[in-house]
Image (spheres, grey):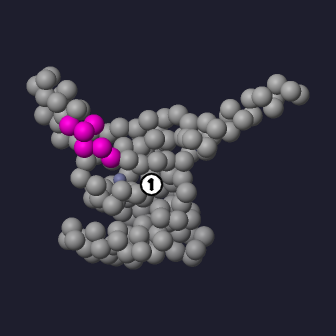
């Protein structure tokens, strides 16, 4: 876990940003989380560890991490997650489970290329696009099917 935090800190420095204490702290909270967190939840989690960051600092830090693709803001919940793709070149895409909240991240150059071509046919020059799917993760989907027959036998 610590190695991933170090990697994010190195990425920050590569982009010319200082690895300030508040930046490290926000990265650590995101890294430890197993689901998307709101800025308020990040602030509260730090407070529980005796670290006080004001709301503006948390927002600014999240904004910077998102700009550098080290973290992402999800459209469906507005929550923030740590990037899990090690700064992949193509767009980062998300599959969000509506049942347990788990987020899986993936990237595919072919999909990106398709989207760029569709937009180009409209005469549109894409700078950035986002992709987020909602549904059920493999575990929740499997659980749903397993629960079905059991309920019927009651
Ligand atoms: Zn990512
Ligand atoms: Zn799930």
* Left-right relation of 97 to 152: left
The quadrant holding residue 8 is bottom left
Query: From the viewer's perspective, is residue 144 above or below residue 7?
Result: above
Q: Where is residue 137 shown, x and y percent of the image?
A: 55, 41
* Left-right relation of 42 to 107: right
Q: State the residue at coordinates (36%, 43%).
A: 93
Q: State the residue at coordinates (21%, 67%).
A: 15
Which SS class for mark 1?
A: strand
Q: Where is residue 130 shown, x and y percent of the image?
A: 32, 39
Q: Main secondary structure of the magenta part?
A: helix
Q: State the residue at coordinates (74%, 29%).
A: 148
Name the residue beneath numbered marker 1.
Answer: 81
Instruction: Give, as a single range, the part of the protein colored magenta.
Output: 107-113
Query: From the viewer's perspective, is residue 64 above or below residue 2?
Result: above
In terms of depth relative to the viewer, which is nearer, 101 or 60?
101
Q: Is residue 101 visible?
A: yes
Q: Is residue 54 magenta?
A: no
The quadrant holding residue 133 is top left
Query: From the viewer's perspective, is residue 38 above or below residue 143?
Result: below
């Amino acid at each position: 876990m610590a190695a991933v935090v170090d990697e994010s800190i190195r990425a920050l420095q590569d982009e010319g940003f200082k690895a300030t204490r508040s930046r490290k702290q926000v990265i650590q909270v995101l890294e430890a989380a197993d689901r998307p967190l709101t800025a308020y939840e990040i602030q509260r989690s730090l407070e529980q560890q005796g670290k006080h960051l004001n709301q503006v600092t948390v927002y600014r830090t999240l904004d910077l991490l998102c700009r550098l693709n080290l973290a992402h803001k999800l459209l469906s919940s507005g929550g923030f997650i740590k990037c899990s793709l090690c700064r992949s070149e193509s767009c980062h895409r998300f599959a969000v489970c509506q049942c347990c909240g788990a987020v899986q991240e993936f990237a595919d150059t072919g999909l990106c290329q398709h989207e760029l071509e569709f937009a180009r046919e409209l005469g549109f020059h894409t700078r950035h696009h986002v992709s987020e799917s909602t549904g059920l993760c493999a575990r929740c989907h499997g659980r749903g099917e397993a629960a079905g027959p059991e309920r019927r036998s009651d």
